[in-house]
Image: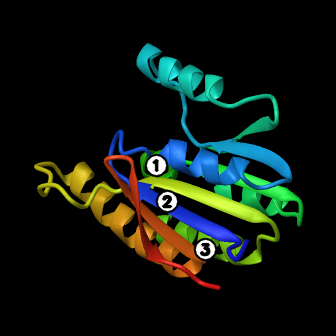
């Protein structure tokens, strides 16, 4: 295994979560799924339940809707196989909480650099569509684009999923 950190991007229903989970399960170690979603409605509760059902007993779930860098630091170990799904939900949580997005992104990249095991981060690519018609959506798209650029620089490998097919954008090692 030549990578320590893998960043997986893709649009909605692109296969990114399935791809990331398969990559994680191909590695021996202590598997931890870091969930950033918060269940504010029935539809999101159903999504979370379906994702949990896709993981077998080897997975432990940790919830980190806002304090992701600290969670990554706590989980860091040479035996760790950590899958974070997803960064855009984390970013949404931070935006709605009025957090310092630039600082949070830097803290995340620093945590990626310190991580000692295998770290996989999943995020939704939102910059391929039209410019949104409202200020919050534009702010989110801008913040997601900046975050993705920073995480891609920090990660050892970056993969874009489209129609279930992986396109390797970056590899190190």
Q: Residue at x 60, y 74 (%)?
A: 109
Q: Nearer the viewer, mark 1 or mark 3?
A: 1
Q: Residue furthest top?
A: 42
Placement of 43 over or under 170, stated as above or below: above
Q: Secondary structure at mark 1?
A: helix
Give the number of the disc on residue 109.
3
Secondary structure, mark 2, is strand
Q: Position of residue 75 (x, y in %)?
A: 82, 56
Mark 2 vs mark 3: which is more N-terminal? 2
**Circles 1 and 3 in contact, beta carbons < 8 Å:** no
Q: Are the residues tagged 2 and 1 within 8 Å (C-beta)?
A: yes
Residue that numbered label 1 is attached to: 16
Q: Nearer the viewer, residue 15 or 113?
A: 15
Q: Position of residue 108 (x, y in %)?
A: 62, 67
Residue drawn at (74%, 29%) of the image: 56
Answer above or below: position of 124 versus 171.
Answer: above
Q: Could you say whether the residue bearing mark 3 is in a helix, strand or loop?
A: helix
**Residue 149 at what x, y percent from top left?**
42, 75
Marks 2/1: CA distance? 6 Å
Asked whether the viewer can see residue 132, the reply is yes
Instruction: Report the disc number at residue 147.
Output: none
Cα gap from disc 1 to disc 3, whole angstroms? 20 Å
- Name the N-terminal-most of marks 1 and 3: 1
Neighbours of disc 1 within 10 Å: few (<14), some (14-19), many (20+): many
Say if 60 sits above or below 34 in the image.
Answer: above
The residue under label 2 is: 8
Question: Does residue 66 show up?
Answer: no
Count of numbered circles in the view: 3
From the image, state whether disc 2 or disc 3 is nearer to you.
Answer: 2
Is residue 137 placed above or below 58 in the rendered structure?
below
In this figure, which colouring scheme has been used for the structure? rainbow
Q: Which residue shows up at 49% across the image and 74% down it?
A: 152
């Amino acid at each position: 295994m030549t990578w320590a950190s893998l960043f997986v991007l893709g649009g909605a229903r692109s296969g990114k979560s399935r791809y990331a989970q398969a990559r994680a399960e191909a590695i021996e170690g202590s598997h931890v799924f870091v969930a950033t979603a918060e269940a504010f409605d029935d539809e999101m509760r159903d999504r979370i339940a379906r994702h949990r059902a896709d993981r077998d007993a080897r997975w432990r779930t940790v919830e980190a809707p806002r304090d992701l860098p600290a969670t990554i630091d706590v989980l860091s170990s040479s035996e760790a196989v950590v899958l974070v799904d997803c960064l855009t939900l984390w970013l949404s949580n931070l935006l709605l909480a009025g957090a310092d997005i630039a600082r949070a992104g830097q803290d995340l990249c620093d945590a990626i650099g310190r991580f000692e095991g295998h770290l996989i981060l999943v995020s939704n690519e939102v910059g391929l569509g039209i410019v949104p018609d409202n200020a919050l959506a534009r702010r989110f798209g801008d913040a997601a684009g900046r975050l993705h650029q920073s995480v891609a620089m920090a990660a050892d490998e970056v993969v874009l999923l489209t129609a279930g097919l992986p396109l390797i954008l970056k590899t190190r090692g």
